[in-house]
Every structure is written in structure tokens, then in C-alpha cells.
Image (tube, rainbow, N blue to C red):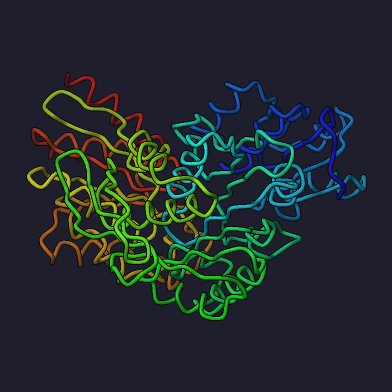
């Protein structure tokens, strides 16, 4: 695919995905004519497309593709054969590309590439890294798997045609139905981060060895004058870095690492630590976040920014001005009776545990009501059945929503929410499981919460989807009590 010129017409099949919508807006702002389609669009991405006047249709109709003289069709990785628009594009021999391909050619281009990877923390770390570059005046381009609050965007082009920086959230999920490589294989990193590696994406990977193989292929792309920045506390990430064909630097909570956080202090609104670089004191870093995972995310961003020549004084100031991306411990609202509603993207048991742990650290004396929707391709299977039993340690009440699209798997492969409920109940939790046949879902969850609320409770939604509008329903319920 040759690089297209602004003015070209681009159509996105599956435009409602977080990355797809963000890339569509960025290309529109860069002067391309952008349109697309999807099913079941919901905020924040539907609102994001509308705010930027992107013409999108609900549903898939092959006639959409011939109403415009298209130069290119971008096929989302959730789109497969049988999609009527894809079939029309194939039959008409239209030029097809994946989202990572168009990012690589038309957005990264001749800029230096910074790629943030790992099972957890990618969106927060990429958002922070992009903000550190922005605060330093480097006008970076970026692609983030969420809406970065400091930019109110998920993607934008670099402020420079070449020799600038483009910072990408490097996803290990596959690229498209016609390209089963991980997305991050398209981004050609000069500076690469591996934050952690665990088993995930059970629909495309069969084992942790499959995932390790993909990360090894990724490290093989880093040039000898580049750098690989690795979480030294993560055994799998460290293993992958052992034979990397480039310089490697490690970060963690131990001063033996190249980048380390020591003398950690947690207050009511922030966490501070002393930054060491190769054992030498650099200065104090203060973040308005809690939990070891957020310190590790910060160390990764600091290391990547430092390799771009950004001075520590700039990094130190920028971190204090950083705003978390949407749906990453996002405060939806604070209501009467001291109620606080959070929304978080966590759906893997490790991420859920880390999120709830950081909430408990911050709000030691308040009850936590955790609402979990098993929705992702991994969380809906029983591959993490026992891990989920330990993920909710810091919650007082656990609410388990319906398993999303359970018909995809045999009963023996599915997450058993009743079994999970029994295990959590035995550990002393108050547990509610929404019945799969409930016609009022998720209003049944709202009713349960209303019946069990106490003053100053924290309610957190844990899902990589919309939770059937639960956030809006709870907001309306809490406002009525105000």
C-alpha cells in the first residue's frame, strides 16, 4: 500500500472500535475524507465520532461502499468473512488494509516510533508517555486504546512530517482476519516498552508460549541503536528481553534496576517516590495514583521519555499535570450520602486485583462494591476460573453480570459464575449474580445495589464493554437520592 495523500477517501468497516474510531478521527483531521459503519456503537466512541463530524452508519450495508468513490477500505480486526460490506469490497476488488497498516504508513511514517506493550497498563502508560513528550514541546503523534484526557483524543498525527515522534499502544491482539500477526508487529519501534506479559486473548492464543513467541518477534524489530525497556519484576517479560538484539534497560521497585522507585510514600491524594537511575538519585516523583502497578507504569514512561532526551525537570512537572485516560479509574460522579461511582476497563483477574487494591489503599475505611461484567474473549471462558476467585480480595460486595455471548463456548469452557459466587461467598463476600434469564438486566443489579447501599460506599464498574448501560442507570439512581 502506498502512502495516500490528504483528500483521499477512506472507509472504516468496524469504525466503532476504540482504536478504529480514534484513527478515523486523526485521519480526518489530517485532511482525509473519512466515513464508516459499525453495529452497537456506544459512548465514549460514538460520542467521539459525532463530536468530530465523522459520517458513520449503523449496521452493515454493501451499498454504503458504492455511494462514495473510495480510495481505501480499512478492515477492523473484529470483521470477518461473511460481513456484507467486506464481501462487497472483495468482489469489487477494492484496496483493503488493516488499521495497524494505515497507522504505520500514514501516521508513523518517517517519525521515530515509541511502542508501549504488555498485558496490563498499556493505555495508561502510553497516555502518560505521550503527555510527557507533549509537555516537552515535541508535538508527538500517538495512538492510544482510549481517550487521553490531556488531549481529549485517542489518536493524532505528529506535529512534524518526519523526525518527530509517534507513540503507539502496541496491542498483541491479531491485526485482521487476513493478517494474524500481533498489531504491534507493524509499528517498527525505536523505543519499545514491555510492561508485563501474562496469558490473555484466549480466542487467538492457545498458551503463554504462543504469546511469548509473538513478543519475541516484536523485539526482533528493534534496531541496534534503539532500546528495549522492560519491567524487571516480570519474569516472562525479562525472559523475552534476554536475547533482544538491542540495548535493554529494566525498571522496577528494586534499586538494582536501571530505573527504580524507592522510598515510596502514599498520602490521601497521591503517591510519591524517589527515582533512581542506575543507582543515582534523580529526584522525587509525585503521581495522583495509587498501587504498585501505577508506579511501574510511571517508571516505564519516564524511561522512554528520557531516551528521547526529555530532561527530568520537564518530566517531573508534566507528571503532576497528567490526567488518566477515560475508563481507567475514572470518577463518573460523586453523589449524596458520600457515594462515589468509578468506571474501569479492568477485565483480566490481574488487572481487577490491582485496581481494587489501589482503591483499598486510597479508601481504607470505605466499603467497595465491585460490579464485574465477564465480557472479553478471555474472561468469558473458564481459563481464569480460579484466578477470579482471588481477584476480588479488596471488595466488600461483588456483583457479577451476565457472561457476554455465552453461546460462543460449550458449557465446559464457559466461566461458571455460580461457582465463582460460591467461592467468593465462602471467603466472606456478599455476592450477587445476575441471572442469565433476567429480563430486567442490568436493572436487577441497580435494585440490588439500592437495597444494599450505605453512606460513603464506593461502586466500581469493571468491564471492557458497556455493561448494558449500567453506568447510566446507576447515575440516574444515585441522582434521584440526591
Res. 392 in view: yes
Q: Tell me how many marks there are.
A: 0
Q: Work out which quarter of the rendered image holds the C terminus and state it.
A: top left
State left or right for residue 158 relative to residue 330: right
Residue drawn at 36 percent across, 69 percent down: 257
Q: Is residue 439 left or right of residue 56?
A: left
The x and y percentages for residue 181 are 68, 65
Depth check, front residue: 163 or 38? 163
In the image, 5 versus 440, the foreground residue is 5
In the image, residue 345 sits, relative to residue 231, either above or below, namely above
The location of residue 321, given as percent across then percent down, is: 36, 33
Q: At x 18% / y 39%, what residue is drawn?
A: 458
Work out whether residue 381 or residue 169 is closer to the camera in this orientation and state it.
169
Note whether residue 38 is visible. no
Q: Is residue 107 left or right of residue 253?
A: right
Give residue 128's quadrant in the image. top left
In terms of depth relative to the viewer, which is nearer, 31 or 251?
A: 251
Give the residue drawn at x 50%, y 37%: 136
Q: Residue furthest right?
A: 92
Q: Residue at x 44, y 48 (%)?
A: 464
User: Is residue 394 left or right of 181 when viewed as pictured?
Assistant: left
Is residue 26 depicted above or below 365 in this figure? Answer: above
Image quarter for residue 81? Answer: bottom right
Picture coordinates of residue 45, whole percent (x, y): 54, 33
Amino acid at each position: 500500500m502506498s502512502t495516500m495523500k490528504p483528500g483521499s477517501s477512506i472507509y472504516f468497516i468496524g469504525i466503532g472500535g476504540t482504536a478504529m474510531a480514534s484513527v478515523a478521527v486523526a485521519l480526518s483531521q489530517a485532511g482525509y475524507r473519512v466515513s464508516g459503519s459499525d453495529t452497537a456503537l456506544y459512548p465514549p466512541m460514538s460520542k467521539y465520532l459525532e463530536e468530530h463530524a465523522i459520517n458513520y452508519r449503523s449496521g452493515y450495508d454493501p451499498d454504503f461502499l458504492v455511494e462514495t468513490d473510495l480510495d481505501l477500505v480499512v478492515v477492523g480486526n473484529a470483521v470477518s468473512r461473511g460481513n456484507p460490506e467486506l464481501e462487497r469490497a472483495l468482489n469489487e476488488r477494492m484496496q483493503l488494509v488493516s488499521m495497524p497498516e494505515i497507522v504505520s504508513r500514514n501516521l508513523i511514517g518517517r517519525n521515530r516510533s515509541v511502542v508501549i506493550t504488555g498485558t496490563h497498563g498499556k493505555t495508561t502508560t502510553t497516555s502518560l508517555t505521550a503527555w510527557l513528550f507533549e509537555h516537552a514541546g515535541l508535538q508527538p503523534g500517538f495512538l492510544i486504546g482510549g481517550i487521553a484526557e490531556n488531549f481529549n483524543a485517542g489518536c493524532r498525527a505528529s506535529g512534524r512530517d518526519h523526525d518527530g515522534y509517534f507513540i503507539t499502544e502496541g496491542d498483541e491482539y491479531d491485526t485482521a482476519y487476513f493478517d494474524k500477526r500481533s498489531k504491534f508487529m507493524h509499528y517498527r519501534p525505536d523505543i519499545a516498552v514491555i510492561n508485563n506479559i501474562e496469558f490473555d486473548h484466549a480466542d487467538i492464543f492457545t498458551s503463554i508460549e504462543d504469546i511469548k513467541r509473538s513478543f519475541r518477534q516484536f523485539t526482533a524489530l528493534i534496531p541496534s541503536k534503539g532500546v528495549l525497556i522492560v519491567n524487571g519484576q516480570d519474569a516472562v517479560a525479562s525472559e523475552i528481553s534476554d536475547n533482544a538484539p538491542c540495548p535493554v534497560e529494566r525498571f522496577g521497585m528494586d534499586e538494582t534496576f536501571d530505573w527504580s522507585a524507592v522510598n515510596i510514600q502514599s498520602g490521601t491524594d497521591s503517591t510519591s517516590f524517589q527515582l533512581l537511575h542506575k543507582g543515582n538519585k534523580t529526584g522525587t516523583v509525585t503521581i495522583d495514583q495509587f498501587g504498585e502497578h501505577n508506579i511501574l507504569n510511571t517508571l516505564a514512561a519516564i524511561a522512554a521519555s528520557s531516551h528521547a532526551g526529555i530532561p527530568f525537570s520537564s518530566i517531573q512537572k508534566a507528571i503532576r499535570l497528567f490526567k488518566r485516560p477515560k475508563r481507567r479509574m475514572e470518577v463518573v460522579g460523586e453523589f449524596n450520602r458520600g457515594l462515589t461511582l468509578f468506571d474501569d476497563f479492568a477485565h483480566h483477574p490481574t488487572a481487577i486485583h490491582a485496581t481494587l487494591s489501589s482503591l483499598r489503599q486510597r479508601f481504607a475505611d470505605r466499603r467497595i462494591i465491585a460490579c464485574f461484567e465477564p465480557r472479553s474473549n478471555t474472561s468469558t471462558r473458564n481459563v481464569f476460573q480460579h484466578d477470579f476467585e482471588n481477584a476480588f480480595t479488596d471488595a466488600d460486595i461483588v456483583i457479577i453480570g451476565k457472561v457476554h455471548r455465552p453461546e460462543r463456548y460449550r458449557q465446559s469452557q464457559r466461566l461458571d459464575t455460580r461457582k465463582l459466587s460460591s467461592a467468593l461467598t465462602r471467603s466472606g463476600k456478599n455476592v450477587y449474580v445476575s441471572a442469565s434469564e433476567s429480563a430486567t438486566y442490568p436493572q436487577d443489579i441497580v435494585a440490588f445495589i439500592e437495597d444494599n447501599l450505605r453512606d460513603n460506599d464506593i461502586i466500581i464498574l469493571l468491564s471492557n464493554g458497556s455493561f448494558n448501560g449500567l453506568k447510566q442507570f446507576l447515575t440516574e439512581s444515585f441522582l434521584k437520592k440526591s
